[in-house]
Image: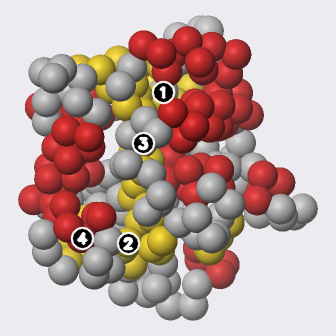
Amino acid sequence: MKNRPLIGLTLDAEQPGGYSKFPWYALRCNYMDAIADCGGVPVALPHRAELATDLLDAVDALVVTGGAFDVDPKLYGEVGRNETVMLKEGRTAAETALIGGALARGMPILGICGGEQLLAVALGGTLIQHIPDTVPDALPHEQPNPRNEPGHEITLTPGTRLAAIVGAATMRVNSAHHQAVRAPGPRLVVNAVAPDGVIEGIESPAHRFCLGVQWHPEFLIDPGDRRLLEAFVEAAR
């Protein structure tokens, strides 16, 4: 049995300015630290769709991270694009290739925030392009308080993999998103919901570990966050 599995994490990307005069990758340290602290060896995966097979050969599991980007509505069958939607085509192409390859291998996958949304789309789901324009009386899903604090509570769906992992009926989570899963599609089930009805988590019963959450468990705000990451790393052994 492998003691510490290699966990591949996707990166965000930024245009020149700030850190560098040239295009650069970005990822918060706590993504890597949380995976390491929960028993994995984190490694970064670049945005090279043509290398997806080789990259997946090198790792035991895949984390599709969040970031400053949105999924192109055309990928889930919508022609119009909300003015708030910001695309990063290179990132989305690479992550789509990685998700497809990981699903085909039965490799454990964890999608976080925007990663959860892309995972949903890859498995036939659709998205809400901008929550404030779609959900009446929506919570502030882009929470005003710091991201290392909880923004709201979620209710876990009984009988799901996530509920079994967390071992509780509710969690307190942070919230840093303006989009969400609209419909999970036929291959996914909803495993968590916010009080305003916004979907907060999805999973595929047909896969060994294929789960997405709308919040950021790498901040380890709720006890269930560590349980989720530990279960993910364990599935990669």
Type of the residue with mark 2: Asn
Q: CA distance from mark 1 to mark 4?
A: 28 Å
**Residue at 48% of width from left, 15% of height from top?**
57
Where disc 2 sits, the SS reads: strand
> Reading the chain from its start, which is encountered first: label 2 or label 4?
4
Q: State the residue position of label 4.
A: 163
Relative vertical location of residue 99 with respect to residue 26 in this rendering, above or below: below
Mark 2–mark 3 CB contact (< 8 Å): no
**Residue at 35% of width from left, 25% of height from top?**
60
The quadrant in which residue 100 appears is top right
Q: State the residue position of label 3.
A: 109
Mark 2–mark 4 CB contact (< 8 Å): yes
Query: With 55 as the anchor, is 229 left or right in this view?
Result: left
Type of the residue with mark 4: Ala
What number is the disc on residue 191?
2
- Residue 235 percent coordinates (x, y): 26, 40
> Reading the chain from its start, which is encountered first: label 4 or label 3?
3
The quadrant in which residue 91 appears is top right
Q: CA distance from mark 3 to mark 1?
A: 15 Å
Q: Nearer the viewer, residue 175 or 59?
A: 59
Relative vertical location of residue 4 with respect to residue 196 in this rendering, above or below: above
**Residue furthest toward the bottom?**
136
Q: State the residue position of label 1.
A: 11
- Residue 121 percent coordinates (x, y): 65, 56
Mark 1–mark 4 CB contact (< 8 Å): no
Where disc 3 sits, the SS reads: strand
Whether residue 148 is visible, yes or no, is no
> Reading the chain from its start, which is encountered first: label 2 or label 3?
3
Where disc 4 sits, the SS reads: helix
The quadrant in which residue 131 appears is bottom right
